[in-house]
Image (cartoon, helix red, strand yellow):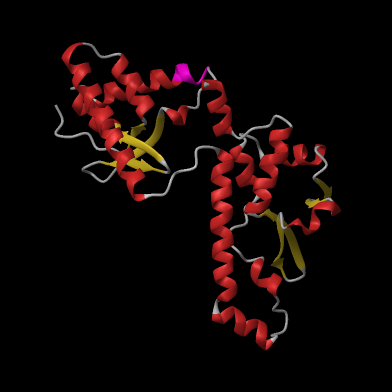
């Protein structure tokens, strides 16, 4: 048996490496990879999210080559353990259940309560962004720029550069849609309209702080306008889309399991 199963936090998910799992269940890694690909092929025909079980990854070989492996969530370990019998299955199950629980408890003890839903996550993010923007306003450099009234420098010039704004492409991924499909949906719901190649909010939403519009110069006499959504706007989209039975992927999965 492997010395100890290692569990790590990967982009907010607790996972373990397929190499460690193979070692623990006394199976060649290539054979476990074959089994996992078989599970993925079956899961791909259903509504289950593959990343809830297995996440593609790589590792460096002794020759410094990138070789494939998988990161297994607790659900992925459950699936592997379900195929094991006898002492091997019992010991593996005991090991991964214990390690995942230990890691979850360690994270919980060091962090405030984690958001349980997509909306709670957005609300927490909005609070954090607002805190950061308040600190930025109090920053002495900011005060100096406003006080000196430099040409072309205004409150909006600074705020529009805030890293908290997201493109529609980033937000549409939360809903499992392409940016084009997501934009059309927002148009159908009366949120935005298209002028040329750019989407703009209807006037009733202009002063809500939902978007930030930036103009980029990409040639001497050519510019491009880009509209991005603030975290406040992102939360607005969540509420209005939910009213129309459009949920983000994470809540679709939860609803399906429930």
Describe residue 207's horizontal placement relative to residue 13 as left or right: right
Q: How many marks?
A: 0
Residue at position x 60%, y 78% from top? 142
Q: Was residue 82 drawn as part of the magenta stretch in this picture? A: no
Of all residues shown, which one is farthest toward the top? 85
Q: Which quarter of the picture shows residue 169?
A: top right
Image quarter hosting the N terminus: top left
Q: Position of residue 107 (x, y in %)?
A: 34, 45
Give the main secondary structure, helix, strand or loop, of the magenta stretch.
Answer: helix
Q: Position of residue 180 (x, y in %)?
A: 72, 40
Q: Which quarter of the picture shows residue 161?
A: bottom right
Query: In the image, which residues are magenta?
Result: 41-45
Residue 163 in view = no
Describe residue 59's horizontal placement relative to residue 218 as left or right: left
Residue at position x 50%, y 27% from top? 49
Residue at position x 55%, y 43% from top? 120
Describe residue 212's horizontal placement relative to residue 53 as left or right: right
Residue closest to the eye, 218 or 167: 167
Asked if 119 appears above or below 46 in the picture, the reply is: below
Asked if 84 appears above or below 205 in the picture, the reply is: above
Q: Was residue 43 drawn as part of the magenta stretch in this picture? A: yes
Of all residues shown, which one is farthest toward the bottom? 148
Q: Position of residue 185 (x, y in %)?
A: 76, 37
Q: Which quarter of the picture shows residue 28?
A: top left
Asked if 258 appears above or below 17 in the picture, the reply is: above
Residue 31 in view = yes
Q: Position of residue 253 (x, y in %)?
A: 54, 27
Asked if 66 appears above or below 84 in the picture, the reply is: below
Residue closest to the eye, 238 or 71: 238
Residue closest to the eye, 43 or 87: 87
């Amino acid at each position: 048996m492997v010395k100890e199963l290692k569990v790590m936090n990967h982009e907010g998910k607790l996972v373990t490496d397929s190499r460690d799992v193979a070692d623990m269940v006394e199976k060649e890694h290539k054979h476990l990879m074959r089994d996992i690909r078989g599970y993925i092929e079956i899961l791909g025909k259903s509504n289950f999210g593959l990343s809830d079980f297995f996440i593609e990854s790589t590792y460096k070989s002794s020759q410094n080559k990138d070789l494939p492996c998988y990161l297994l969530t607790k659900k992925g370990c459950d699936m592997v353990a379900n195929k094991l019998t006898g002492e091997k299955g019992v010991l593996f199950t005991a090991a991964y259940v214990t390690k995942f629980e230990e890691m979850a408890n360690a994270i919980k003890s060091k962090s405030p309560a984690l958001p349980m839903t997509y909306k709670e996550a957005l609300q927490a993010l909005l609070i954090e962004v607002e805190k950061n923007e308040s600190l930025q306003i109090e920053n002495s450099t900011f005060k100096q720029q406003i006080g000196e009234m430099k040409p072309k420098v205004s409150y909006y010039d600074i705020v529009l550069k805030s890293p908290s704004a997201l493109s529609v492409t980033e937000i549409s991924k939360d809903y499992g849609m392409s940016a084009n499909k997501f934009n059309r949906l927002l148009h159908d719901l009366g949120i935005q309209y298209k002028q040329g190649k750019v989407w703009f909010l209807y006037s009733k939403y202009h002063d809500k702080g939902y978007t930030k519009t930036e103009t980029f110069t990409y040639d001497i006499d050519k510019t491009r306008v880009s509209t991005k959504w603030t975290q406040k706007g992102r939360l607005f989209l969540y509420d209005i889309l939910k009213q129309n039975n459009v949920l983000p992927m994470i809540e679709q999965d939860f609803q399906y399991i429930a």
